[in-house]
Image (tube, rainbow, N blue to C red):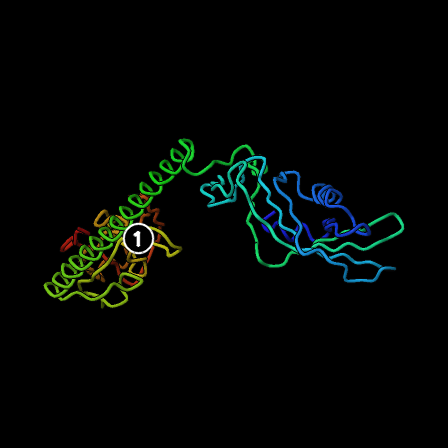
Amino acid sequence: MKHLMLALLTIGLLAACGSSGPTQSEIRAAFEQEIPGLLELKEFKLEQARNTGSDENPVWVARVIATLAPREATYEIDTVEDGVRILKQVRAAGERINTYGTARSVRNDKGWRHSFQYDGSTDPVLGRPRSEYGAGALVAGTPEADALLAEIKRKREEARIAEETRLAEEAAERKRSEEAEAAKQKRVESAVAKHGAAFATRTLGNMVNAGAKRAFLVTGDSGGRDRIWGTGTYTCDSSFTKAVVHAGLLANGESGIVEVIASPEQQRGGFVGSPRNGVDTENYTRSEYACTLRLLERIPNE
């Protein structure tokens, strides 16, 4: 449909020139049978008709000028928005289109066989009737199309603003988190320096000799498989992070400076387990020495 002349390559035409050639009415009738139903033939003219064959085998050639017009308005897709095709008009109904070509007619047993070849001087774009684009297609410039495009624009603007807001909020949250982490790090460094604390080891007595005490930076954590024995007084091979939670010194995820006191005089005492603060401890009858805990400073997260 886009290239009219390509669709008419096999059209039947030839100008009449002399009593031995086809008549113009024959050529026009053949031409009308071959053009698409969308088009109406308005004018038809032959020029420079001549026999390029022989009297026995005549081949008539002529220049053809035809004026066509769409029976209804035609369109092509201008854009697709949210799955809706927006059409722009290509031709108005009745709009005249001049086409040019060469007609060729060859004698056969039944009369004449006609063909038409586009000569390249015109290449009209026709488009297609609106009905071929489906009921949902809209024509650009109509109230329906304008309303749809305005709604799409509004939604896209809302989505753009929402996305920019989300990105800004994420950036602000990252900044707040980074600032909070930096502030906490300063608090941690200050507390560690103040108490001369070491980083907590896996078990309570790992870095504390019997009869001694030492401060540690530790974060409460009741998870994991490490075990713990006792209540208030713990075996020194008990989990450090679980012991501070069980003892109620720190909550899960909370950090602080905790002092561990290793007491050899408790080595013969019994260790009684108990469930406290989400941590279950176990019983134990004898240990080399015992460890007790004291919170020196809680470090707030914010």
Q: Is residue 297 above or below residue 205?
A: above
Task: Residue lying at the far right in this picture: please name it.
Answer: 109
Q: Residue at x 35, y 53 (%)?
A: 284
Residue 244 lies, in percent from the top left, at: 25, 52
Q: Residue at x 28, y 44 (%)?
A: 161
Q: Is residue 4 above or below residue 150?
A: below
What secondary structure is marked by label 1?
A: loop
**For residue 235, what is the image quadrant?**
bottom left
Q: How many marks?
A: 1
Q: Judge from the rendering whether residue 249 lies leftward or rightward of residue 105; answer left or right.
A: left
**For residue 38, what is the image quadrant?**
top right
Residue 181 lies, in percent from the top left, at: 20, 57
What amino acid is at disc 1?
Asp
Q: Residue at x 25, y 68 (%)?
A: 207
Query: In this view of the protein, which residue sits in the foreground, 59 or 298?
Result: 59
Task: Residue lying at the far left in this picture: please name it.
Answer: 194
Residue 16 lies, in percent from the top left, at: 75, 50
**For residue 26, what is the image quadrant?**
top right
Residue 92 lies, in percent from the top left, at: 51, 38
Q: Judge from the rendering whether residue 249 lies leftward or rightward of residue 74; answer left or right.
A: left
Q: Is residue 196 above or below residue 97?
A: below
Circle 1: is it few (<14), some (14-19), or many (20+) Cα within 10 Å? Answer: many
Query: In this view of the protein, which residue sits in the foreground, 290 or 103?
Result: 103
Q: Which residue is mark 1?
A: 221
